[in-house]
Image (spheres, coloured by chain):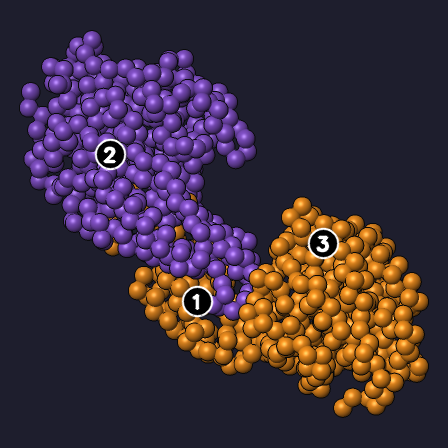
Chain colours: A orange, B purple
Amino acid sequence: MDYSNLRVNAKRLRSSLEEMAKIGGTPGGGVQRLTLTDEDKQARDLFVRWLMEIDCEITVDEMGNIFGRRPGRNNALAPVMSGSHIDSQPKGGRFDGILGVMGALEVMRTLHDNGIQTERPMVIVDWTNEEGSRFSPAMVGSGVWAGALKLDWAYDRRDVNDKRLGDELVRIGYKGGAPCKFFPVHCYYEFHIEQGPVLERERKKSSVHQGIVSLLWGDVYITGEGNHAGTTPMDARHDALNAAAEMILRINRLPSRVGGNMLATIGEIQNHPNSRNIIPDLVHFTVDFRAWEGDIALHAWDLLCEECQGIADRYGCPARFEKTWHVDRSPFDEKLVQRVLDVATEFGYLNMLWVSGAGHDASYTNQVCPTAMIFVPSIGGRSHVEVENTRWEDCEAGCNVLLHCLLRGANELEQKK
Amino acid sequence: MDYSNLRVNAKRLRSSLEEMAKIGGTPGGGVQRLTLTDEDKQARDLFVRWLMEIDCEITVDEMGNIFGRRPGRNNALAPVMSGSHIDSQPKGGRFDGILGVMGALEVMRTLHDNGIQTERPMVIVDWTNEEGSRFSPAMVGSGVWAGALKLDWAYDRRDVNDKRLGDELVRIGYKGGAPCKFFPVHCYYEFHIEQGPVLERERKKSSVHQGIVSLLWGDVYITGEGNHAGTTPMDARHDALNAAAEMILRINRLPSRVGGNMLATIGEIQNHPNSRNIIPDLVHFTVDFRAWEGDIALHAWDLLCEECQGIADRYGCPARFEKTWHVDRSPFDEKLVQRVLDVATEFGYLNMLWVSGAGHDASYTNQVCPTAMIFVPSIGGRSHVEVENTRWEDCEAGCNVLLHCLLRGANELEQKK
């Protein structure tokens, strides 16, 4: 069969996204649909109703992950799978996560409308607690599914009101009976907004990532000498915040020195005693380095330690540098990545190959099955904010790429590799 | 009478300070004697007992200020007065405040031992809530006495547990019946530790201040663009903390540019959302400028606004600069200041004239009666910390200066000026 003229229904995709955006909609035009709240339940219920309308088999596993399965011609074959998450940041946008779920749903609706039967079954998934805003950490549903996190540990995550994730699953009626455990998947595609400004700046309609970058987290602690702001001459001070300021400037300049599109962020700072008229005696700040080449982040960390030690010495403020987390990059499946590029090129979409600086559920699926992601531009590069936005025509383009990637995967009879 | 050989009893001064240091003594060698707590009451009771032992008339006013009056030959004349405060910082030292109270007590005990009658009465005072650590602001007892603060407003100050200052005065039995109101005082001397490193560095035994410096408080607010740390290229960022770091460095360098021994302190910083992997979108920090010449602090503030605006523009981070408080310098009484210098020189103590960067109860008394202060060195310049320390021989020297300044004032018959 030649499906080359098959396209998704852009109007229906938009209307589904708009209907979902009403659930937990904020006055600022975003959504607040924290995981396992009443809003999450309401959105899940609507999603399940839509799955049933196209005759999907629904499975909810013990982590609350929802799977909708569309049978294929040969149901003994491993399915193709796609999805993302319904939950949002506290003041999140209308596309983050939900675009990947509604996009996969639109693919299935398109197949349903056209009476297309695929060789392999096709599965759509909503992963529980991708954001990690209510229950830390992020990507817990996919993490347990992939075997990287323990189920009981996940159940024990608590929100600020001390509610357990496990109890909240029961409360909203989404603690399912199926084991939360990896099953064979032929290929997994996740469709997502970029959450950064690169595609817009490069005037591309879509992109695919080679994989997820390596990440290094560090913590810097600087000890100064607390003293009275009114009685301590400038040249007798050991001001921990002043030393920190010089370090922060230095660290922000590291990426341009080490190259490789490295990113460096100081997102968090604690200052003690944080009193207007006392010279700071203790400062802690965090460091977040990301680079596709893991060596670059490690090299930058070495430079940081050496140069910030010099600054600390100059201020007479002892400093401690702790590398607290380092994960190597996670390259996506080359064949799946190439297929995204091919499909986008066939459709005439300006597209590009890039690396992802952000974590996604695809990070965990990538550990157990061939995985790739499809990205569409974020207007102004904004995300995790209410003004997050994406053009409807870009949503449509990305969804068409998803449709054809899934279709090709679903009609591929031989097991990959 | 020639009193030139009269000296205080250094051993008794030390033993009184050591006994006081037991009340609220901390494992770290400091004291925690927050205002109007049980520890404050215990120390007040001991102080009152000691005053009674030398036949002082005790008056407690409605603010809990304790006055011990030693009659003179002519009790119609305005008294000389000296004192400081018994309350401490949460983890304060064994000299801050209490040295000025025990020092004045030692002066009176010395006069008592030697049967010396002065022309004028002599009054010793313990001011309530100088520190402001439990009930903000600081120097409330002397402020109400000088008419600068309202009594009812002072009563309504609340601690973190929502206890009212007025209620706590009643609870510990120190809400007295006398009105808290300025009465004529011939001269007021306050004896205090320096709380800075200058005397030690200059190898002086004591100093007197010309007055209290002018003070300028400001607040800087910087708005950045919150974004994902993993998806936002370095050159597409508007990082409010990075801009703040550059401003903090610049501000710390202002004193060396404007001269006049100006001090600049950034003591407090708030960063939003203060999350490890989000680019900061809002930073607030405080500015504390102190200089003897008020124009210098104002000039520095103008430079700050101009130069930090340039930094803000470069980062694309709008900034707001608010001058929130400015008080002009408060010069002490010239004749009293000169007397401190004269006495110290007669005794052969290396001494110096200096300016005070810190507020003291003397700031308020200076508004209504001739005032000067006597300072002795702080070891390592440390204060408001448990390791705060002063040599016993320096306590003795300062106390002898206080004795003779008070004695000369008390025997001065004509009203000053």
Do the CB atoms of the residues marked 1 and 2 lie less than 8 Å apart? no
In depth, the one of B247 and B94 nearer the eye is B247
Numbered disc 3: secondary structure: loop
Along the viewing direction, whichever of B408 and A387 lies nearer the viewer: A387
Measuring from the top left, give residue B242's x and y in whole percent. 43, 60
| Parent chain of label 3 | A
Disc 1: host chain: A
| Both marks 1 and 2 on one chain | no
Residue B143 against residue B261 in the figure, above or below: above
- Assess whether mark 3 and mark 1 are in contact (beta carbons under 8 angstroms): no
Residue linked to disc 3 = A34
Position of A283 relative to A149 (above/below): above
Left or right of A192 in this view: B260: left
Q: Which element is circle 2 on?
A: loop
Q: Identify which amino acid the numbered label 1 is placed on.
A: Asn
Helix, strand or loop for disc 1: helix
Q: What residue is shown at x 42% (from left), y 46% (from top)? A: B320
Task: Say whether residue A159 is left or right of residue B273.
Answer: right
The answer to the question of whether label 2 and label 3 lie on touching residues, with beta carbons closer than 8 A, is no
Please give the residue where the numbered disc 1 appears in the rendered image: A252
Q: Residue A345 versus residue A315: which sits nearer the camera?
A: A345
> Left or right of A329: which side holds A282?
left
Q: Quadrant of the C terminus of chain B?
A: top left
Q: CA distance from mark 2 to mark 3?
A: 54 Å
Q: Position of residue B356 (x, y in %)?
A: 24, 38
The residue that appears at 41% across and 32% down in the rendered structure is B137
Picture residue at 29% right of the left edge, 45% below the top: B302
Q: Amino acid at mark 2?
A: Arg
> Relative to A374, does residue B393 appear above or below in the rendering?
above
Report in which chain the residue with disc 2 lies. B
